[in-house]
Image (cartoon, grey):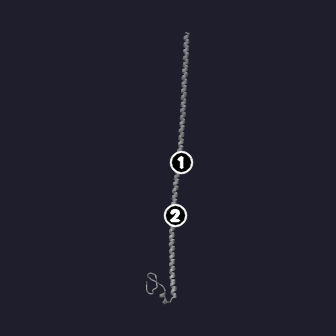
Amino acid sequence: MLATHANVSYLQSHQAAASMLATHANVSYLQSHQAAASMLATHANVSYLQSHQAAASMLATTHANVSYLQSHQAAASMLATHANVSYLQSHQAAASMLATHANVSYLQSHQAAASMLATTHANVSYLQSHQAAGRSSLRLSRTEELKPFQRQFLLPRLCPFCMTIWAKTNSFC
């Protein structure tokens, strides 16, 4: 009986120890799983936050780069437009200057031609009037010196048809 009791106690104590060990193992197992799950969850949260931060950073960087490029493209477009406007304005100014220069040259050449014509005409008129005055004064001075019967023989005469000088007394050329 004592041996049986001892055996029972031994078994009971072993069973209790085994149960406690099993419980401890289960608790440890659960705790380790809970800890692992918690760590995984934490890691997942960290990864989630990191991925969101990375996405936000990428979006911000991309947006900044896009804005930078857009501002540069806008500036380049404005510069190109300004260059085109300046180019057109300079060409228009040059064309206007050339047109003005052409008009001035045209007017100057016409004024010069008109001046030359007027001068030439005045000079011709002046010479003609002086020649006419010289011929008439020459005729008068020579005819006054000659006696009436000498005038018809010595004074050169103009042909009334061709206006050349002829010396014959009573005939034409």
Quadrant of residue 42 in the image? top right
Residue drawn at 55 percent across, 16 percent down: 14
**Image x and y of residue 130, in percent:** 52, 79
Name the kind of residue labelled 1 in the image.
His
- Which three-letter amino acid code belongs to the residue tagged 2? His
The image shows residue 157, relative to residue 56, as above or below, that is below
Query: If the image is split into quadrants, where does the C terminus sit?
Result: bottom left
Indicate the secondary structure of the residue bearing disc 2. helix
Q: CA distance from mark 1 to mark 2?
A: 42 Å
Q: Nearer the viewer, residue 164 or 127?
A: 164
| Residue shown at 51% from the left, 70% from the top | 112
Q: At 55% across and 20% down in the image, what residue appears? A: 21
Return the residue at label 2: 101
Label 1 sits on residue: 72
Q: Position of residue 146 (x, y in %)?
A: 51, 88
Tag 1 secondary structure: helix
Observer-nearest of 116 and 165: 165
Q: Quadrant of residue 39?
A: top right
Q: Residue furthest top?
A: 1
Residue 80: x percent and y percent? Answer: 52, 52
